[in-house]
Amino acid sequence: MREKAISKAKTRILIARRKPEEFTQEDLEVIVREEEDEIKNNLKQKGLLAVAAAFGFGLL
């Protein structure tokens, strides 16, 4: 998961037209942590949707 977060962080930095060298180590860690949190939240959401589907609940 960490590698995926790092990859997403690199993409995010490139989209912002910045270079990783322009950030402090702490800033880079924050960006990676935010991407990790987003990945975790997406996994949780998908898990809840799968459980709801298994019980036959639809989205309202």
Image (spheres, rainbow, N blue to C red):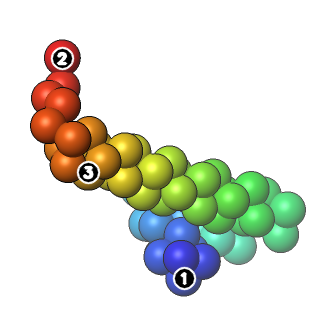
Q: Which residue is drawn at 14% across and 37% down?
A: 56
Upstream in the sequence, badge 1 or badge 2?
Answer: 1
Q: Which mark is residue 3?
A: 1
**Which amino acid type is marked by label 1?**
Glu
Is mark 3 in CB contact (under 8 Å) with mark 1? no
> What is the distance, in whole Å, between disc 3 and disc 2 at their CAs?
15 Å
**Which amino acid type is marked by label 3?**
Ala
Q: Residue at x 60, y 77 (%)?
A: 2
Q: Which mark is residue 24?
A: none
**Which amino acid type is marked by label 2?**
Leu
Q: What element carries label 3?
A: helix
Q: In this view, does 21 lie to the left or right of 4?
A: right
Q: Which residue is drawn at 42% across and 57% down?
A: 43
The residue carrying pointer 1 sits among few (fewer than 14), some (14 to 19) or many (20 or more) residues within 10 Å by Cα, namely few
Q: Is residue 59 left or right of residue 45?
A: left
Q: Is residue 41 left or right of residue 51?
A: right
In this figure, what is the number of numbered marks? 3
Residue 55, given in percent of the width and then of the height, sits at 21, 41
Q: Give the mark toward the camera: 3 or 1.
A: 3
Residue 13, given in percent of the width and then of the height, sits at 53, 60
| Residue 40 in view of the camera | yes
Q: Which mark is residue 50?
A: 3
Query: Compared to 4, does 16 lie above or below?
Result: above
Q: Which of 56 and 47 is in front in this view?
A: 56
Q: Residue 60 carries which label?
A: 2
Q: Is residue 25 left or right of residue 53?
A: right
Q: What element carries label 2?
A: loop
Q: In which quarter of the image is residue 6?
A: bottom right
Query: Compared to 54, does 8 lie above or below?
Result: below
